[in-house]
Structures are given as C-alpha cells and as structure tokens.
Image (cartoon, rainbow, N blue to C red):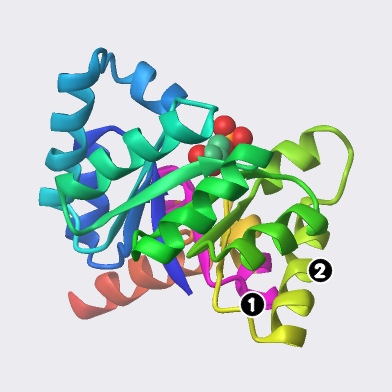
Amino acid sequence: MKFFIDTANLAQIKEAQELGILDGVTTNPSLMAKEGIKGKDAIMKHYVDICNIVDGDVSAEVIATDFDGMIKEGEEFAELHPQIVVKVPMIKEGIKAIKYFSEKGIRTNCTLVFSAGQALLAAKAGASYVSPFVGRLDDISTDGLRLIEDIRVIYDNYGFATEILAASVRHPMHIIECATIGADVVTCPLSAITALLKHPLTDSGLATFLADAKK
Ligand code: G3P
C-alpha cells in the first residue's frame, strides 16, 4: 500500500520524505489556503516545490467546475512537472474532463467521492486514482471504510486499473483498516503516519534493553 501525505506544508512533506516511506502527496484548495499560498503563480510554484521534495505523484486540484476551465487548468498543471496528477471533482463536467485527460495520457485523481456509484463512474472515465473520503463519511455517522470495501470489490470484479486512494484518513486505525481491505493508497496527515510507530511495549522493551546493555 502506498503512503501519501495530505498536506501542502513543505516541512511536513520533507519530514515524511526523510522517513523513507513516502510515495506521494495530495493537496486541495483548503490545504493550500492553510499554508497561505495565494494567487496562480504562487500556487504553481508551490506545486513544483512539492514535486522537488517528494519522489512520487503529487495531486494538484483544479478550481474550475466547467469542462473548458478544468481542461485549461489541468493541462497547465500537467505541464508543470511529470509527477503532477490532476485532481478533478466528482461532478458531471469532472467525469467528462477525466475522460478527456485519460485519452490525452494526463493522469487524474477523482476527488470528493462518497459513494460506490461515483467510484464506478470515475473508473469508467479512466481516472488514475479515485479518492473516497473515509473520515468525512464517518463524521456523518456513515461507515467510510465500508465504502473502501465496496469499491475494492467492484474494481476487482471488472479489473479496473483505477487505484483506490483512501482520503480523509485521519488516524492509525483508518490506515490499518485500509491496508486490511486492500486500498491501493492512503493519504493522511503526518501525525497519523507517525502514530503507527507507537507502542508502549516497544518503549518499555527498549528501555529495558538499554538498561541491561549497561550491566
Ligand atoms: O484531501 C482530501 C481529504 O483527504 C481531506 O481530508 O480530513 O479534510 O476530511 P479531511
């Protein structure tokens, strides 16, 4: 399973890259705003900066919601760097754009996916990744991980090449459950990845080993 980090924060991306387990980065307009990145030139530069840190795919989300606008933005993103994947929202125009990009050889990540039907459409259109939002479904008392299971079954039934990128993954159990189900990728904050390191028996066992080594 690939690990992507869901942030536009360069320091956190560097920290995850240095850990040696990072496979890519996802961003969205909210994450870019959180880092204070404003204006087209600054946003484009920031995507290149991210690509220069990480070895792997970097999702850059279009702001336009009409077909022509999405194509224009997506083509500009794709020209920026070979690691860029164009992130497109799950709307009717978005599906048309994903089909267009797929025929042009431009890779896409279909975002804001909350149902198996939406994931099926994204795969049919040729999306490289589909991003079901696990945490946001949990937030409204709906089982986000069940959606990952359903998409896994559907994609395996028909051999779709679209990778399931479990998004809105917020804590270590989400990551472990996604790995159990067979998600291709998880994207989450750095804190959820580093939380996987922790176990009290590791800490107490290491303390004992180090104390015994001094004897
Ligand atoms: O990037 C999309 C998704 O990962 C957002 O997560 O925690 O804002 O629901 P969250």
* Residue 110 in the image, given as x and y percentages of width and height: 55, 50
Residue 115 relative to residue 34: left or right: right
Quarter of the image where ligand 1 sits:
top right
Residue 56 relative to residue 131: left or right: left
Q: Nearer the viewer, residue 82 or 196?
A: 82
Quarter of the rendering occupied by the C terminus: bottom left
Element under disc 2:
helix
Instruction: Name the disc covering residue 207, or none.
Output: none
Q: Which residue was labeled with disc 2? A: 150
Q: Nearer the viewer, residue 113 or 214?
A: 113
Residue 211 relative to residue 185: left or right: left
Compute the Cα span from label 2 to label 1: 11 Å
Residue 89 relative to residue 150: left or right: left
CB-based contact (under 8 Å), mark 2 and mark 1: no
Q: Is residue 176 above or below residue 189?
A: below
Instruction: Name the disc covering residue 182, or none.
Output: 1
Ligand 1 within 8 Å of disc 2? The answer is no
* Residue 131 in the image, given as x and y percentages of width and height: 59, 52
Mark 2 or 1, nearer chain start = 2
Who's the residue at 34% across and 66% down the image? 105
Who's the residue at 47% across and 59% down the image? 198
Determine if residue 128 is in view: yes
* Residue 171 in the image, given as x and y percentages of width and height: 59, 48
Q: Amino acid at mark 2?
A: Asp
Who's the residue at 32% across and 58% down the image? 24
Q: Which residues are magenta?
A: 177-194
